[in-house]
Image (spheres, grey):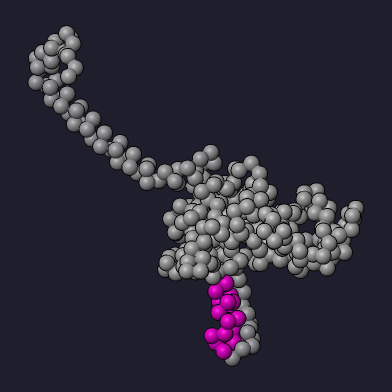
Amino acid sequence: SRQPSAEEPAMARGTRSMEPGRREQSADRGRSMDRGRSLDQRQTCDRGRSMDRGRSEERTGVERLGLVLDVDNTLVHSVKRTSFPVPLNVKAFVNGRDEQELFEWRGPTLMSGASCGCYVKLRPGVHAFLRELKYFYDLSIFSMGDKGYLDFIRSILDPDGSIFADENVGSRNDMQGVSHDQKSIRKVCRHPTQRIVIFDDRYEVWKNDLDRSKGQLAFVRAYPYTFLDDRRRELLRLLARPGEAAVPEDRDVHLRHAARLFRLLHSDVVGPRQLSTKAALHEAWMRTLKGLRILILDGRTESGVTKAAQAFGARVNQQLDRSL
């Protein structure tokens, strides 16, 4: 409905009066522009498909993978406050860097008047673990606790919200399965299955996703962290006394070594070899005992110990000989 300007007829006449050679050049330029636009459209589509990956590379320039972390017995250990007959002095529990490692979550008050509160002990090195890996992985957490409890854990582990995005956090409300006993990877992580690692002390809560992946989903079982149960007697003796400075020493170094493993997996997946996380994990296991020969005095060739040793790269002998 727009009226043509006075200049447009002249421009049209000028175009019609162009020399044949110039018209052909203009047509070539038009076709080239069309090809360019088509290429741009394809590139835009490619950029759209890799948008998640692009977001993962912001600032660092390093492509990130997906690392899904369990909370309880993996990053922290929590027990009900009622499991201790007297209140604990949580502020007295600090590590060698004068950082508090024991906290108290008061929780909601039930209709009966009882409290759902608990004591939360951080696993040694958890802050360094998260700080190191956030540049190589998009970190997610999934807890079987309720949202209020998980928000409290996040306030300790990620007070400024720079590590765990809201969409990468799952709680009991997000559990699936017939009896709501299954965690769901897609609730907290959007990376392809071949680029995800799960770090949890319980295998069974991921069984549905692991079965569905047909062996493509990498799972690293965390050594269960149960400090408050294991050292309960010492905690009562030391932390239940007002003004007591001494605390039980926590020598757990699991997260330090786990971080090293996850860095190794990352280099194998995003490096020239472009392995899946499951394949990279298998190779990492095989390197653990590579070059080691083990004599297992067990007549069963299919024993669990033999299989485990071989899975970690050891060469197993069943008989003693001079070469061994």
- The location of residue 196, given as percent across then percent down, is 49, 57
Q: Residue at x 12, y 22 (%)?
A: 23
Q: Is there any visible trace of residue 177 in the rendered image?
A: yes
User: The N terminus is located in which quarter?
Assistant: top left
Q: Report the side of 94 relative to 60 (left or right).
A: right
Q: Report the side of 8 relative to 171 (left or right).
A: left
314 is within the stretch colored magenta: yes
Q: Residue at x 55, y 52 (%)?
A: 169
Question: Vertically, is 301 above or below 166?
Answer: below
86 is within the stretch colored magenta: no
Q: Report the side of 77 relative to 91 (left or right).
A: left
- The location of residue 310, given as percent across then percent down, is 55, 76
Residue farthest to the top, as pictured: 6
Question: Vertically, is 16 above or below 36?
Answer: above
Residue farthest to the front, as pictured: 112
Q: Residue at x 16, y 13 (%)?
A: 4
Question: Vertically, is 272 above or below 311?
Answer: above
For the residue pair 229 and 36, the one nearer the viewer reads as: 229
For the residue pair 232 and 282, the one nearer the viewer reads as: 232
In which quarter of the view is residue 116 placed? bottom right
Task: Give the extent of the magenta segment.
Answer: 300-319
Q: How many marks?
A: 0
User: The C terminus is located in which quarter?
Assistant: bottom right
For the residue pair 273 and 178, the one nearer the viewer reads as: 178
- The location of residue 36, given as percent across then percent down, is 26, 33
In which quarter of the view is residue 247 placed? bottom right
Q: Residue at x 19, y 28 (%)?
A: 30
- The location of residue 258, given as percent across then percent down, is 63, 60
Q: Is there any visible trace of residue 264 in the rendered image?
A: no
